[in-house]
Amino acid sequence: MPKDNTLLDRDGVRLTVDDTVANVTLTNPAKRNAQSFALWRALAEAGRLLPGQVRVVVLRGEGLSFSAGLDRQAFTPEGFDGEPSFLDLARYPEQELDSVIARYQEAFTWWRRTDVITVAAVQGHAIGAGFQLALACDLRVCADDVQFAMRETSLGLVPDLTGTKSLVDLVGYARALEICVTGRFVRAAEAERIGLATVVVPAAELDATVKDLVAGLLTAPRAAVNETKALLLSARHNTPAEQHAAEREAQGRRLRDLAGLGE
């Protein structure tokens, strides 16, 4: 495959692949990478287009902000051209509305699949949908100018792009509730202290830090990495006995594979 091969470039999303590393970039810096329904469809498509050899996916936003959240045009009566407005969505039958939101969520769910590790490189604003997109990734490398905020509740809505579970898993129920209901900014030092940020670095060092992290993530054998990620994800909901059994089963698969006895 040619180096830096572009597989997708539309609706504010670009997917490029360099061997085992894919880069997903939000490409509308003039609007601080504000999100739209079309962008969500493109993000979901990026997940479907990932070649099988990809092991690490890096998510970035061009410009000064990672993503300032949902484009405010979505809140106007007209909405986006060719798309339902929020007022239109409010009139949908319950089952149809549920289906529409589920399709939007597809842009945020594939980042936790067990065959890849996903890294968000976050600078500047990560607000609302932008915050939830960063939360969708396994790891968050943050510049020291990062500002997270969950503004949906302040707008009379709720965070519905899969961010609530990730936020609670990272910072706990009480802190997640306070962040969501107040809508306040969580800045770099606090983000690192409470577990939102995997690491915080000066903005000028963000790309180099991500590059070093990606190199580290690629050192272990892929099958062991995938099994480990699956175990850690299951640990959040398994009982101790269930998790112990899952560890035994995974190790059995690894031992058989190393001995050349795998299927």
Image: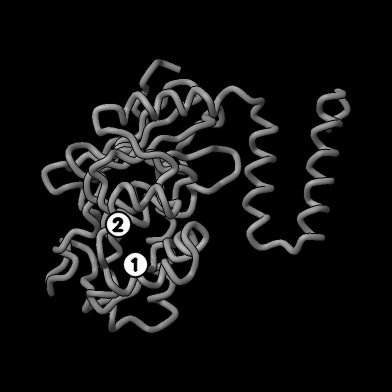
Query: Is residue 61 left or right of 221 when viewed as pictured?
Result: left
Please give the name of the residue rendered at 41% of the width and 39% of the height, measured from the top-left corner.
199
Residue 250 spot, x, y in % from top left: 78, 42
Under mark 2, the amino acid is: Val
Q: Is residue 227 left or right of residue 77?
A: right
User: Which x, y percent locates residue 2?
Assistant: 40, 15
Identify the residue at image location x=33%, y=34%: 201
Residue 119 versus residue 111 in the image, above or below = above
Q: Badge 1 is on which residue?
A: 179
- Mark 2 and mark 1 in contact? Answer it, CB < 8 Å: yes
Q: Residues within 10 Å of mark 2 (few under 14, many from 20)?
A: some
- Indicate the secondary structure of the residue bearing disc 2: strand
Split into 4 quadrants, where in the image is the N terminus? top left
Say few, some or many: other residues with alpha carbon within 10 Å of mark 1 (under 14 / 14 to 19 / 20 or more): many
Which corner quadrant of the image does residue 87 belong to?
bottom left
Amino acid carrying mark 1 in the image: Ile
- In the image, 196 versus 210, the foreground residue is 196
In this rendering, the answer to whether 20 lies above or below 116 is above
Q: Position of residue 190 (x, y in %)?
A: 35, 53
Q: Residue at x 67, y 55 (%)?
A: 234
Q: What residue did someone put label 2 on?
A: 186
Distance from Cα at disc 2 to Cα at disc 1 = 8 Å
Q: Up-down: is 80 above or below 98?
A: above
